[in-house]
Structure formats: C-alpha cells, structure tokens
Amino acid sequence: MSITPSQSRAARGLLDWSQQKLADRSNLSQSTIRDFEKGRRVPSVNNLAAIRSALEVAGVEFIPENGGGAGARLRK
C-alpha cells in the first residue's frame, strides 16, 4: 500500500518529526521528502517504501481510504 503526501505530513506531526528527521530515518534527501509532501513529484517505489517503513518503525499505522479519507495514527 502506498501513502499520500497528507499521510506523510500527518505521521510526521504525530511523531513531532521534521522533514529532515524523516529524511535521515529513511536515508533520503530532505528535498525528496519536501517535494513529495508538497505534491511536486511522486518518489520512486523504493523511496516511497523507505518513507513508509521509517514511519511505521517509529510507531505509525496507516489507515487506508475507507470513504472517510486515508489517515495515520500511532499504534497502541
């Protein structure tokens, strides 16, 4: 499952992470994170997986689109 730019921003907010911290944790550049979250470009499949993985390892759970919109929350 892919994640959306808004899910990435929400997940960072839940963790109180900057774009730089997410970049560091996912081994990507800050510009990759910034451009993705601003909707300027879609990262490669591998880079998107790295973003998602870094956030999930930190405790984020992604909520799929279910009519109410996709989201993110911290695991219990």
Image (cartoon, grey):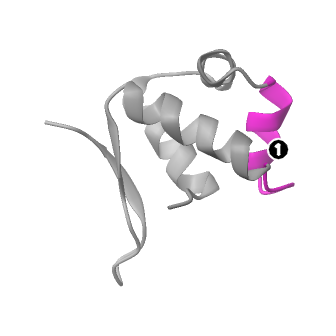
Residue pictured at 51% horizontal, 52% vertical? 7
Q: Position of residue 49 (x, y in %)?
A: 60, 44
Q: Which residue is denoted by mark 1 in the rendering?
A: 35
**Going by the picture, which residue comes out furthest to the front?**
46
Q: Is residue 32 magenta?
A: yes
Q: In this orientation, which residue lies closer to the viewer: 18 or 56?
A: 56
Residue pictured at 66% horizontal, 46% vertical? 48
**Going by the picture, which residue comes out furthest to the bottom?**
67
Q: Which residues are magenta?
A: 29-43
Residue pictured at 50% horizontal, 61% vertical? 1
Q: Is residue 5 magenta?
A: no
Q: Is residue 19 visible?
A: yes
Q: Position of residue 69 (x, y in %)?
A: 41, 73
Classify 60 as above or below 20.
below
Q: Is residue 26 left or right of residue 14?
A: right
Image quarter of residue 61? top left
Q: Is residue 5 left or right of residue 3?
A: right
Q: Is residue 66 left or right of residue 2?
A: left
Q: Position of residue 52 (x, y in %)?
A: 53, 41
- Residue type at mark 1: give it: Asp
